Structure formats: structure tokens, C-alpha cells
Image (spheres, rainbow, N blue to C red):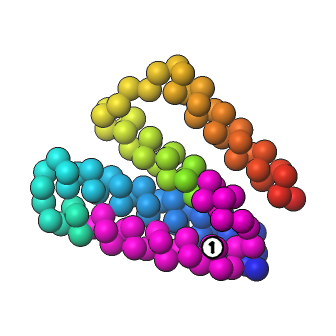
Amino acid sequence: MIPRWAFYGLLLVAGLTGAVGDILLAKWAKEDRAAWMAGGLANWLVCLIVFAMLMRYGGRSLGATFILAAVVHIAVVLGWDLATGEVRTSAVEWTGIALAATGVLLMEWGAE
């Protein structure tokens, strides 16, 4: 099992590279440039490798690891959408985001 700080560092890398992969694939879908597709797939490959490392050495269940990585991933994509003005987030959606963040905190407190 890896130290807690390493687990969270790898979790951030997995979530970030997965999100960047999604952003690049979305750009490819709009602009049809092969470079966006290649970049998106390369980022996803890194994300999968890091996620596999988390599963092997992280000492957490598949579900907990996936949810924690997904929250990072979603936060980065949402931040990108808000920064670029591509989406408007409703009050109900913000409530869902707050509940997801609360869920992550509860999962972490329960893991100790």
C-alpha cells in the first residue's frame, strides 16, 4: 500500500488526465483535427495507467477509488466549461455538486 499523500497525488493525476482527455476529445468533435483526437487518447491512456496503479497499490476498493477519481475529473471538466462559458449551471445542478462533495468527504472520514 502506498502512503496516503501518494494515493491522493495519483488520484489527482488520474482525474486531471482523464478530464483533459475529455476536453481534447470534445474539441476534436467540434473541429475535426486529428491532433485533438491524438491528445485526448494519449491523456486517457495515462489516466488508465495511473488508475491501474491506484487499484494495485492504493489499498482502496474499486468503487471508492473510482468515485474519488471521478469527482476530480468532473470538477476539472465543470471548471473548464464554466471558464469557457460553454455551459450554465442551474441551482439544482449546484446542489448536486455540493452533495457529491459532501459524499466524498463522508467516504474519506469513513475510511479512517
Instruction: List x then y, in percent, for residue 79.
Output: 44, 42
Answer yes or no: is residue 5 visible: no
Taking the image as shown, residue 21 lies to the left or right of residue 109, namely left
Query: Which contiguous range is marked in magenta?
Result: 39-68
**Residue located at (75% from left, 45% from top):** 105
Instruction: List x then y, in percent, for residue 31.
Output: 13, 51
Q: Residue 20's quadrant in the figure? A: bottom left
In this picture, is 100 found above or below 52? above
* Residue at far top of view: 91
Q: Quadrant of the N terminus?
A: bottom right
Taking the image as shown, residue 108 lies to the left or right of residue 40, namely right
* Residue 104 part of the magenta-drawn span: no
Magenta stretch, overall SS: helix
The residue tagged 1 is 54
Instruction: List x then y, in percent, for residue 34.
Output: 14, 65
Instruction: List x then y, in percent, for residue 52.
Output: 56, 76
**Residue located at (60% from left, 64% from top):** 11
Residue type, mark 1 in image: Leu
